[in-house]
Amino acid sequence: MSEHTLSSALYQGQQYLQSGHTREAYAIAKKMRDDFPGDASVLAFMSKVEMSVGQLEQSLDHIMKAVKLAPDRLDYQITLAENYAVMNMWKKVEVALDSMVSQAENNFQILDSAGALYSLCNMHGKSRDTIVKALKLESDNAILTYNLAIQQRFLGDTEGALDSLDRAIALNPKNTEAVYIRSGMRRQTEQSNHIPFIIARLGEMKNVQQAQIQLNYALAKEYEDLEEWDKSFEALNAGAKAKRQTVKYDSVRNIEILTRTVTLQTKEYLSTPVTACRREAPIFILGLPRTGSTLVDTIISSHKDVVSAGELPDFPKQFALALKKAAAKTPGLGRDRMALSLKIDFKALGQGYVDAVDGKVTYSKHFTDKLPFNFQYCGMIKRALPNARIIHVRRDPMDSCYSIYKALFLSPYPFSYDLVELAQYFVAYYRLMDHWRAALPGAILDVDYEDVIADHEQEARRIIDWCGLDWDPACLNYRETKKAITTLSAAQVRGKIYSSSIGKWRHFEKQMAPVKKILEDAGIPFK
């Protein structure tokens, strides 16, 4: 293969990779590697292909060789940092990116990529600073301006985020995600709102499904702020209906997982001795979304001995790996994940989890993991990590269902876009949490959102004591935290505690009737 042919092959391989034809890209990469084993460009491309198919060790080996051969190629260093990120080696990502950014003052593409990677790895301050550098090179870049707004929002710079969002929308009025986020950044008023703009965009983009979703959710939020209750719910329904059409969701199957967990993970089973990982670092904050978990997480992580790791995917990931290993040892159970869950190596599960977090977060004594869906795994968590703390944050059921329904999640909560499916899922969740309390007596601290609002200091002290920590006054000044908050409620958590969201569902009693009936039939009390 000549140099000219190599260049053509690289181009063809990149085209295949970008279009998702990984098998064809892999075949070209292998041929080039055989013909040019010491070519840095071939090694870098091979790494990208291997990363795309999950061959992470090989990918890392090839890109490290490419960087060694061509240390001045910053794009290769970006690929190296991407490898580290995919492998959850966040500390190495930071070192690689810091070095790269220091060399790339006038390289827009590298700064852009580095800013995105910093954000991916929860280094939001460095992401913001890198994006600012990139914007000095391309000040009218709409995408980068929007990305800056997101980092500012995470870091609590509300005014800066609003300015950046306004500019991003001015540069690209079709950025309906920016419109949606802007609506949630502050309370809208009769004198200052974006309702005419949103309605105009809805008319102009009526054939763009994603735009209709985001704009209707934005409109619902702004009408709610203006206490135009019927208009708010009408827009919310339109957005939720459009979103539900994009989601594949089997309600029966998902509820069956929760109900079968109750059947299999009995009190008797959970009380049997097991070899486990004894690390005390994790504090799990779980429940359904939009119940106040971010508020509780911010209170706890304001403590000098605690760092928030955010919503980590690591326990579900490690659990899936444990199931795979159990399946290999007990082939008779086939694909019965629920039955396999009783056969896993719990010590390996716990150790695999804390090792994964160790690679991402630097902490002194404890870290919080506030992935809501971990409520499904309370039994597995206590088997694998018996010294971990579990805090369940809950809210009045009707308020909880309304708050979930009105949220347009970045993470997938597929049950949240239809009122009946939402209520049915809530009942299954409620039953499962009742089961955990009975099967794991004293292992879970229930925290009611309403109690945190009513007596913040008392609840904060109770929570910190439950975590086995000495009292830290900083837990009362959580709004002053410099730590990033990346959830939908970031703006609210940094503001003053307010009670206006309590009982808000009553403004929509007629519209929420399907939820109310399902909860009443299930015997679930609400206010």
Image (spheres, rainbow, N blue to C red):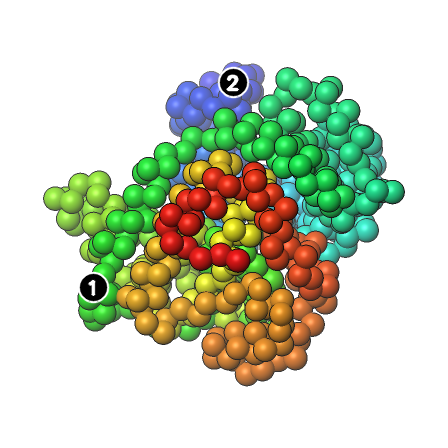
- Residue 66 placement (x, y as % from top left): 53, 39
Return the residue found at the far bottom: 470
- Decide which of 63, 56 is in the foreground and name it: 56
Look at the numbered disc 2 and give the secondary structure of its residue: helix
- Residue 236 placement (x, y as % from top left): 62, 35
Q: Residue at x 72, y 67 (%)?
A: 480
Q: Which residue has dot 1 on it?
A: 269
- Residue 174 placement (x, y as % from top left): 73, 26
Return the residue found at the far right: 191
Q: Which mark is residue 441?
A: none
How many marks the image carries: the answer is: 2
In-image side of 288 versus 323 (left or right):
right
- Residue 67 placement (x, y as % from top left): 56, 43
- Decide which of 309, 20 is in the foreground and name it: 309
Q: Residue at x 23, y 54 (%)?
A: 263
* Relative vertical location of residue 385 with respect to residue 125 in this rendering, above or below: below
In-image side of 91 versus 442 (left or right):
right
> Sequence order check: which comes first, mark 1 or mark 2?
2
Determine if residue 9 is in view.
yes
Q: Which residue has dot 2 on it?
A: 12
Q: Residue 484 is drawn in which quadrant?
A: bottom right
Mark 1 is on which residue type?
Tyr
Number of other residues with Cα within 10 Å of mark 1, as a class: few under 14, some 14 to 19, many 20 or more = few
Label 1, label 2: how many angstroms apart (C-alpha)?
Answer: 56 Å
Q: Residue at x 37, y 37 (%)?
A: 251
Disc 1 versus disc 2: nearer the observer? 1
